[in-house]
Amino acid sequence: MKNKRILLIIGGGIAAYKCLDLIRRLRERGAIVRVVMTGAAQQFITPLSVSALTNERVFTELFDLNDEREIGHIRLSREADAILVAPATADIIAKMAGGHANDLATSVLLASDKPPLIAPAMNPRMWLNPATQRNVARLKADGVRFVGPDQGEMAERGEAGPGRMSETPDLIAALSAMLGMGHSGPDASGPLSGKHVVITSGPTHEPIDPVRYIANRSSGKQGHAIAAAAQRAGARVTLISGPVTIPDPAGVDTWHIETASEMKAAVAGALPADIAVFCAAVADWRVDNENGQKIKKAKGAPPPALSLVANPDILKTVASLKSGRPRLVVGFAAETEKVLEHAQAKLKSKGCDLIVANDVSSATGVMGGDRNCVHLVTRDGVTSWPEMGKDEVAQKLVEELARLIETGVANQPSAAKSKSKAKARAGRGDAAKNARKKKVRK
């Protein structure tokens, strides 16, 4: 996004606070961000905060003498490479559908020579109201693009459903697509074009009773980022996700499961694949006999004894397939100590081609955070990467997987071992033949 000019129109909704992070992320990618704020938006965040992050003046008034001397609302719309309305309230969407231009935001949108990108954010009932849906349909017919809304809890207590504004990574991906960078869908010329990639992500929940479960800590951020990066690289991606609170990556075929057994079945159903990446934090054990009713505490009684059994080892199962094994099988090792030692042992015991290892002890902040520091462990050795954002880790990992597939290095360590053993056997055979010849001559 370097030097791309983004015009961000901030509407008046509680989701306006997300725009502060969005601006920062856009600028990190080299974009030039200019902002128009509606009067209602200024009730949620201040122009001073926005200006500090954009390092640009914030535009708020249609009848500004200095700007309108040069017909400022026309200039704002024409100078932008892309226009994003976020949050787009029901009011802004209605005004756009009706062609209104009674403030700076709607005047800019009406005067624009390019279709904007709309990120709706509103109460679920407002979004599902027939009037809003008619307005959205009208705008889509006019060529306006939408990203979201997502499902989830609202700011208002007890309200949930469709209406949450999409998260920053999804907004950036949609903007990238509008700018012709292909980040919202498969790139037909990408390094993984024509490949099928299966990825697992998030935790699994193993029920104890209807209200309690055993789980691992996992936000799903790294696995979902890998799925998005693989899709951008041209792959057909199947993402198998445990229970997470983050949205599905845009355009990725996502299957939702809860337990390890369901994940195993989903992986089997998704195969065959060229690459399988097992990023999910699968619970190692489950309760032998799930209780059909909530287990009640009895006064003075000891806690109930839980009988645990091992969950299926999905990584080892797929890596050990005799027929239909993916060319490249990647596992993840989340460790709190002896990271490399445990990762190397896991590589050997699971039979996979690559282990991505990281330190998830509480001091690192990796679990649930946005940054990661990983080590790539193969039979040939260890490659350590510096700490970076999870999106960057995903991008680099996908590039490495594409290289391994392209160069035929996938499974090479074991093939190389077989070749060296064959060579050694041949060498021993030749030596024996030569010894017999010498003996005959003597």
Image (tube, rainbow, N blue to C red):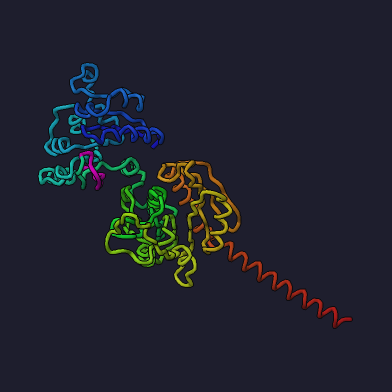
Please state the extent of the stretch shown in magenta in the rendering. Answer: 144-156
Q: Of all residues shown, which one is farthest toward the front?
A: 300
Report x, y in % for residue 161: 21, 47
407 in the magenta segment: no
The answer to whether residue 349 of the structure is visible from this angle is: yes
Question: Which quarter of the image is occupied by the C terminus?
Answer: bottom right
- The residue furthest top is 65
The x and y percentages for residue 67 are: 24, 20
Q: Is residue 49 above or below residue 277?
A: above
Residue 360 vs residue 27: left or right? right
Q: Decide: is 218 above or below 172.
A: below
Residue drawn 19% across the image and 26% down it: 39
- Is residue 154 shown in magenta? yes
Q: Nearer the viewer, residue 390 or 343?
A: 343
**Residue 237 appears anywhere in the view:** no
Number of numbered tags placed on the structure image: 0
Q: Residue at x 51, y 62 (%)?
A: 352
202 lies left or right of 108: right
- Rendered-image quadrant of the N terminus: top left
Horizontal side of 319 relative to 137 (left or right) equals: right
